[in-house]
Image (spheres, grey):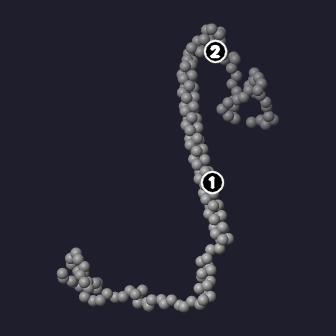
Amino acid sequence: MQAQRRPRGGTYIYGNTVQQADMPMPRRGWELEEPVRKKKLSPQVRRNRRQALHMNPAYVAFLTVAAVASLGVCIWYLQVRAELTSRMEHLTVLQQELADVREENTTRHNAVVDSVDLEKVRERALGELGMHYAGTDQMITYPNSAGDYVKQYEDIPKDGVLSESGIKE
């Protein structure tokens, strides 16, 4: 393989295999440090470390109580979560039932509305029941600027004015 010098300062080797470098590899920073030697420990430090590693019965009892309490909380959480899931499923069933009932109600309402023939109602009212259309002398027009309908609590006077304010326009 031929090695050629690259313009930026590196060496480029043609081929697909790595060749052994001619120069020895530089040592890394961590390889340069000397290994850390263990210091001699005093007997008191060794005795303290041994005591720290020793578990007395009170500590074991505390850890047991803590583990049982944690287990109890986990079981309680799983029960609450299962109940929540059950209620959500029940809610979904109820919502589906409500949607079905609403759809059925709408269908029946539309069937009732479609079954009413207004022409038959008019013919029966005019023919069988003796009703007739109102004449112009029976109609009173009432100007209503407040809204789109009027609630009538008493008879409307002939002149069509219910009350007058002292303000003249």
Position of 12 with respect to 66 (left or right) is left
The residue at the point 75 percent across, 24 percent down is 156
Looking at the rendered structure, the kind of residue marked 1 is Trp
Task: Give the foreground label among 2 and 1.
Answer: 1
Question: Which x, y percent locates residue 94?
Answer: 58, 38
Question: Which x, y percent locates residue 167?
Answer: 79, 37
Mark 2 or mark 1, earlier in chain: 1
Quadrant in the picture for residue 90? top right
Residue 169, can we see it? yes
Residue identifier under label 2? 133
46 versus 97 height, above or below:
below
Residue 7, can we see it? no
Give SS at disc 1.
Answer: helix
Question: Which x, y percent locates residue 15?
Answer: 21, 76
Residue identifier under label 1? 76
**Image quarter of the C terminus:** top right
